[in-house]
Every structure is written in C-alpha cells, then in structure tokens.
C-alpha cells in the first residue's frame, strides 16, 4: 500500500496517472503516454477468507484464478466468476463482469461489501453501501479506473459442490429459446430439474443451445468420469455433441478459458495436429490476447490479406445487455445483418439494494443503469467481418450500438465504442459521473470515462 501511494505521489502534478500492469482484458486501442504507471506490485493476493461469513478480502490486482484456487480448497467460490482467468477483482468491478450464475446472483460488483479505493486525488477511502462514500460505492462500477483504483475488496462467496452436471438443450427457434430463458430465470429450474448455472450459444437462427448446470455432489454410478476440455477435446464443440455432461467445479469455472470461448480457432489451437503440440499451459485466454496484441502491432495477417486482394476487416468484439423481451428479435437482426457466430448468451438480473420502488432501488448503479427486477440477456460476439465496398471501418459497430439503444439495452465498454459525447453520457450516467469526478478527481489526474472508452485513452 505504501509503495502504491508513494508511486502516486512521485508522478508530477499535471501528469496523467495510470496503472503499471502487464496484462489486460481490454480490447480498446490505447494511446501510449510514456509516463510511469502506479506500482501495483504486491497488490495481487488474497488477504483472507472468512469461511463462517463466506467472505474474502482480496487485493485489487488479484485475479479470479488466484482467488478461486484459494476458495475452492475451502468449499467456496465467488458468487460470480467471470470466464477468463486473468480478469482481476478490481477489473471486474470497475469494468463489469458476468457469468452463468448471473441470472440468480447478479454481477460481480453486487457481491462487494466494501472496497478501498485510491482516488484520482490521491486519497485512500473505504466505500460501502452506506456512509460517507456511498456515492463512490455505487458509482465505481463501469468507471473503468477513471475515478480511482480498487486496492482492497471484501466480496461475498457461496458454497460449492464437487461437480457441475450439465444439460445441453437445443432449440430450433429463437422465440422458444427466449421463452425458456424466462421460465428458468423465474422458476430456477427446467423440465423438473434445478438450474444453478445458465448460459447459452447461438449458432444460427434455427440452431441455438442453453447450457443448464446444477450442483452435483458425487459421480454417477455408471458411465465415464468428469469431462476434460483442457486436452484434445474442445468445450464449445461438446455443446452440439452431448446432451448431458459432467465437469469438476474447477473445470466448469474455467471451461471457456482454455479456448477463449471459440476464438482460439483463429490461431489454429483447435486443429488436432497443432493442438497436440501446443502446450496445455499456453492454451489460455491471456496467451491468445497477447497474440492479438502482436497482430494489432505488426498487422501481419492484415498485410497478407492485402497482398491476396482480400478486403480489410473490421473488428467486432462486443458484449451487450438486451432486455429479455427484445432478445430474439435482436438476435435475428444481428445474425442477418452482421453476421457473426457463434454468439454467447448469458441471462442476468440485478440483485439490487432494497425492496422499495424509488429510483435508488430501480437504478442502483448509475453508470450502468440496468433496472432491478428486469431480466436482461448478455450477448457476446467476438470476431472480424469484411469491410463492405463503400463502407468504413467502424460502420458495423455503429449499427450495433444503434440497435442496442433502440431496444433499451446497454453495451460494455471494454472494447471499441463510437458514440458521440451527448449519446454516451445519456446512456452512461453523465450527471452522476460529473458529480463523482468533481469529488474524487477534481484535478483530472485520471482520464474521464468518455475519453477512455471512446477517445482511446
């Protein structure tokens, strides 16, 4: 902590402040500042786990991989574990996160009981749901480090069973898929069986799947043991091939990380011959992310496409939250207009702060104002599409932004955004953000949210 505060004070007044970190799960291009970053060494650990109260104190740069390794040994896990191992607790709270428990337990920042924040003014404050810094507690999610950095977080945990039993249910119609989501979220089960985990995969308008998981305490009496998707088998392929499956809780939590959902295919990691010689330790999301970074820097594939006379390609890497009632229509538009598949699907409901009907209860997180009591469906689509003749790079992403806004949805800001300022601040709590900025970063040492998300800061 002293090192962090000391590194902040060593940055000259008027110079920008940023984190000195080696990994990132952002997909926005960032401008190099040349300035030294905050020294976050020593802020990447688990401080303590309180088994009785089911809480953990963690440092802001602690990854979910590190936290899960500790909590599973104690029969616990974070209430929501984002899919990628190197996502940090601080990053998931300031930048939002989601996973298959979100339909019943909300988003990662809703598991936070309190957090210590190094603000843009250099002050270390403790923010809780009530008290002096409740405004920062509620405004920190989706602020992306533009108000301050999480130094310590106290988060809720939930008990685990040794295994997760899966049912992969196919749907031939998107309206039927949508209706099933509503039923599962409302009833907590499907076809007479409990559902503890819920996500999905959309391949086309007439082929989609829901993956329904339930805690399991023991192996079945007959049949194979738990599946292993860290070797030759590829998890996303199993969804189309197997009606039922079983994974250890550890392998379930990281089922998407090994192949970065399905995106490792772009690097050949799913080709059987290459997969056999690709070290298992290097089949993970942060490795693929570094490969993308090398391509962004040296543009080898883009240059080869140019030499072959192929059109340039636009990166479409987005996660959007769509109200459940509009999800089927949005998917039909997306698959026809973009098109890019598969699409990941993850329902969610906010847990909220209280039982009342006031604005604070219905919109508790002002910078990402989803409504408490309403079901949303996160849709994730990650890839590239050809730039059409006469079109410009960014046109497809702009159409996505418009379509999301038209149905009352929101999109995450970890990737490219193209909003004008007026539209952006209307969607992401501009009035509340300006008040927070005045209080916690009055000298503007940190970028503002628009500059960071849209201005490529």
Image (cartoon, helix red, strand yellow):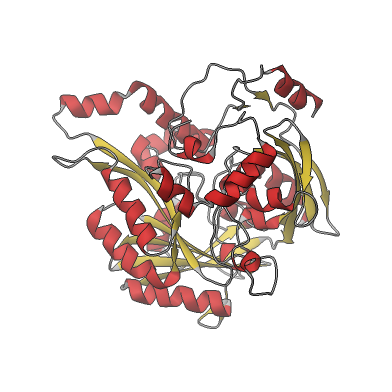
The quarter of the rendered structure image containing the N terminus is top right
Residue 350, how many percent across, how many down?
60, 65
Q: Quadrant of residue 410?
A: bottom left
Residue 50 shows in this picture: yes
- Tell whether 264 sits left or right of 446: left
Q: Position of residue 440 (x, y in %)?
A: 69, 39
**Which residue is depicted at the point 45% across and 44% down?**
259
Residue 303 percent location from the top left of the image: 24, 24
Q: Is residue 15 left or right of residue 286?
A: right
Q: Nearer the viewer, residue 420 or 83?
A: 420
- Residue 111 placed where, x, y %? 69, 57
User: 361 and 40: which one is in front?
Assistant: 361
At a point 73% along the width and 57% down the height, the residue shown is: 157
- Would you place residue 341 above or below residue 391 in this image? below
359 versus 60 height, above or below: below
Q: How many marks are shown on the rendered structure? A: 0
Residue 65 shows in this picture: no
| Residue that extends furthest to the bottom in the rendered view of this protein | 192
Give the quadrant of residue 159: bottom right
């Amino acid at each position: 902590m002293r090192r962090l505060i000391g590194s902040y004070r060593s940055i000259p007044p008027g110079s920008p402040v940023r984190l000195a970190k080696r990994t990132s799960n952002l997909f926005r291009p960032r401008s190099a500042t040349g300035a030294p970053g905050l020294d976050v060494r020593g802020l990447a650990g688990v401080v303590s786990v309180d088994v009785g109260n089911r809480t953990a104190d963690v440092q802001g740069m602690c990854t979910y991989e590190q936290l899960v390794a500790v909590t599973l040994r104690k029969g616990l896990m974070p209430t929501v574990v984002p899919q990628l191992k190197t996502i940090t607790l601080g990053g998931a709270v300031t930048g939002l996160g989601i996973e298959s428990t979100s339909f019943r337990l909300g988003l990662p920042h809703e598991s936070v009981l309190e957090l210590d924040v190094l603000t843009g003014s250099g002050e270390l404050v403790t923010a809780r749901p009530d008290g002096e810094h409740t405004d920062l507690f509620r405004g920190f999610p989706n602020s992306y480090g533009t108000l301050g950095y999480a130094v310590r977080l106290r988060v809720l945990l939930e008990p685990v069973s040794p295994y997760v039993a899966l049912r992969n249910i196919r749907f031939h119609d998107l309206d039927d898929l949508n209706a099933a989501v509503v039923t599962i979220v409302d009833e907590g089960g499907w076809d007479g069986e409990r559902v503890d985990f819920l996500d999905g995969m959309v391949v086309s308008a007439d082929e989609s799947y829901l993956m329904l998981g339930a805690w399991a305490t023991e192996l079945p009496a007959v049949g194979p043991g738990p599946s292993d998707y860290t070797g030759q088998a590829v998890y996303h392929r199993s969804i189309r091939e197997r009606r039922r499956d079983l994974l250890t809780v550890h392998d379930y939590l990281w089922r998407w990380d090994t192949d970065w959902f399905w995106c490792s295919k772009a690097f050949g990691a799913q080709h059987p011959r290459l997969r056999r010689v690709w070290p298992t330790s290097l089949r993970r999301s942060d490795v693929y992310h570094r490969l993308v970074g090398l391509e962004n820097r040296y543009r080898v594939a883009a240059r080869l496409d140019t030499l072959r006379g192929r059109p340039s390609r636009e990166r479409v890497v987005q996660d959007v939250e769509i109200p459940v009632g509009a999800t089927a229509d949005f998917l039909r538009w997306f698959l026809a207009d973009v098109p890019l598949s598969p699409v990941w699907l993850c329902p969610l409901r906010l847990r909220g702060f209280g039982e009342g009907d006031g604005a604070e209860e219905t919109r508790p997180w002002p910078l990402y104002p989803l409504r408490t009591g309403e079901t949303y469906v996160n849709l994730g689509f990650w890839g590239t599409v050809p730039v059409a003749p006469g079109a410009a790079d960014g046109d497809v992403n702009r159409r996505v932004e418009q379509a999301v806004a038209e149905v009352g949805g929101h999109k995450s800001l970890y990737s490219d955004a193209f909003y004008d300022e007026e539209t952006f601040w209307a969607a992401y709590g501009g009035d509340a953000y300006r008040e927070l900025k005045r209080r916690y970063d009055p000298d503007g040492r940190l970028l503002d949210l628009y500059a960071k998300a849209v201005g490529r800061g």
